[in-house]
Image (tube, rainbow, N blue to C red):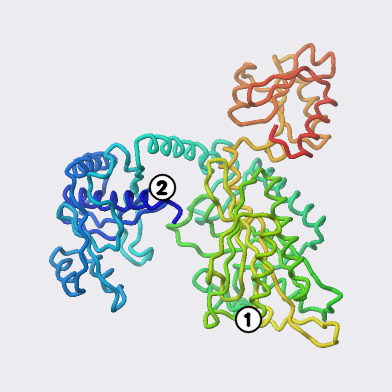
Amino acid sequence: MAQDEQLHKIRHSMAHVMAEAVIEKFPGTKVAIGPAIEDGFYYDFDLPRQLNEEDLESISERMQEIIKEGHEFQRSVVKREEAYELFKKQDQDYKLELLEAIPEGEEVSLYNQGGFVDLCRGPHVEDTGQLNAQSFKLLNIAGAYWRGDEKNRMLTRIYGTAWKNPKELRQYLQRLEEMRKRDHRKVGRELDLFSTHEEAGPGLIYWHPKGARIRLAIEDYWRAEHLKNGYEMLYTPHVGKSWLWETSGHLGFYNENMYSPMQVDENDYYIKPMNCPFHIMIYNTNLHSYRDLPLRWAELGTVYRYERSGVLHGLLRVRGFTQDDAHIICTPDQVEDEILEVLRFSLAMWKAFGFSDIKAYLATRPGEDKSVGDDSAWEQASDSLKKAIEAEGLDYEVDEGGGAFYGPKIDLKIKDALGREWQMTTVQFDFNLPERFDMTFVDHDGKEKRPYMVHRALLGSIERFFGVLVEHYGGAFPIWLAPVQARVIPVADPFNEYAQDVKRKLLAAGLRVEADVSDNRMNAKIRNAQNEKVPYMLIVGEKEKDGDSVSLRRRTGKQQDVMTVEEFIGFANQKIADKEEI
């Protein structure tokens, strides 16, 4: 449990207090579920009317009264029939449905506080008086389908946060405000990086010129580093016949996340949700020897997956995205070294992008009846993953039985500037696809054998990674990623021509640069550049023109001595090469 036990009890108890307050305020309310979650709690309600912000204030006031009344949280274990009659009498349909889902033989426990009775396992604090009336806040109202199914009724979800004391609450709300300021959707609009267009298709990203510049810098670096590390680049189709997806198993196991087929020449074609089957088709083009292996094949492949509209979220949850995909095809005796190199490569990439707080999660075999492949292969694969993690000195947790049915995996989670953890890199063994596609290689003894296949994505997807990157830096990107690395600002109109001349020289040197020759005053131009988070402002006037120079000002407000244009080019290029911020 990420949150400590006492916080979990506080938040779970606060959810029940909120439910009691809502029922009192809005007679006829039906209650669904109300768990404690990271940083807070929520409860889903089927209400007689829509709520507004004023309602949240009213509910909060009643919650404070309930807390002061000191109602005891009373637990009781009852027979299923008794619970059924109780919730039927209260006309609580959702509780009846939850009750039916409890397996036979499992105890049915109820919690009662102040007359509000909930179907609940607990735990809770002893009484509402142990909660702090000044240490919680109701945050917002959202919609949520019952049981997450769009076919079910839309419920009203109220989110709240609760802490041990008012100081912790204030610190959290300050952090929340910083998160709002850094929200990639907000920053994306402000810096003109990307957009989405519901009318043209939800979950699809439109990259604007400045966003595309950052993406290009990411992809150029990604390709260069992969080539240095012995990878070859692939490009594969965007669609494939149904045979491909039947063979891979996607139509059987992943169909609900795939787009509907299109018919071409009386055959069903599917737009790809994954790149791996295409890479295997390339592998099976030729007969391979153990001398050919390992093969490291990488692709920035755009895939499409159907996500429910309710879960789409800016760049973080989309329907079309580009995976930084790679597959390593190797012999069993090569796998340990390959995994170690993947991990080292991944950590080096994350360091370059400014992330150093990284934790690994190792997921192992879910059970023989729920997985494919023999015991020795699973044991070797899991051992290789574990050794690689330990060799790099990474903090890690083992998720026993948490692997996919087709192989164990490592997930790397990074922490951003606000301390939030994001799951990004995945290193996944696959004992399934080599068998399904009959992949083979000729070993030392002349016999055909199955190769090992490792799926590997370092950044996860360009879209999601970009969203995390925007929020990590709050839009103030390091110089090597900034869409505009420098803006030339003339002190007055007579120096516009020199500003344009400086711009041309910097562009020729490969820098991303603009010149502001608008009618705005110089101070307004500087303020605009700072608001747009441009790393360097190059102020030019009479002195700079005469000396073929610029006066450097950083976005932080720090000013530096005048330097020649050539000196600035060398200075900026060194910062870019070193991956420094500014």
Q: Nearer the viewer, residue 405 or 334?
A: 334
Give me the C-alpha separation between circle 2 and circle 1.
40 Å
Image x and y of residue 40, in percent:
37, 48
Image x and y of residue 211, in percent:
64, 43
Q: Which residue is tagged 2?
A: 39
Residue 100: quarter of image: bottom left
Q: Is residue 451 above or below residue 470?
A: below
Image x and y of residue 521, in percent:
62, 16
Q: Is residue 571 above or below residue 151?
A: above
Determine the residue positioned at 56% across, 79% down. Answer: 371
Q: Nearer the viewer, residue 468 or 358?
A: 358
Q: Residue type at mark 2?
A: Asp
Q: Are marks 2 and 1 in contact (CB under 8 Å)?
A: no
Residue 424: quarter of image: bottom right
Q: Nearer the viewer, residue 280 or 540?
A: 280
Q: Quadrant of the C terminus?
A: top right
Q: Nearer the viewer, residue 12 or 441?
A: 12
Which numbered circle lies on residue 103? none
Residue 310: quarter of image: bottom left
Secondary structure type for disc 1: helix
| Total residue callouts | 2
Which numbered circle lies on residue 375? 1
Q: Residue type at mark 1?
A: Asp
Left or right placement of residue 527 versus residue 34 in this view? right
Secondary structure type for disc 2: loop
Q: Quadrant of the N terminus?
A: bottom left
The residue carrying pointer 2 sits among few (fewer than 14), some (14 to 19) or many (20 or more) residues within 10 Å by Cα, namely: some
Mark 2 or mark 1, whichever is nearer to me: 1
Q: Earlier in the sequence, mark 2 or mark 1?
A: 2
The residue carrying pointer 1 sits among few (fewer than 14), some (14 to 19) or many (20 or more) residues within 10 Å by Cα, namely: few
Left or right placement of residue 298 versus residue 145 in this view? right
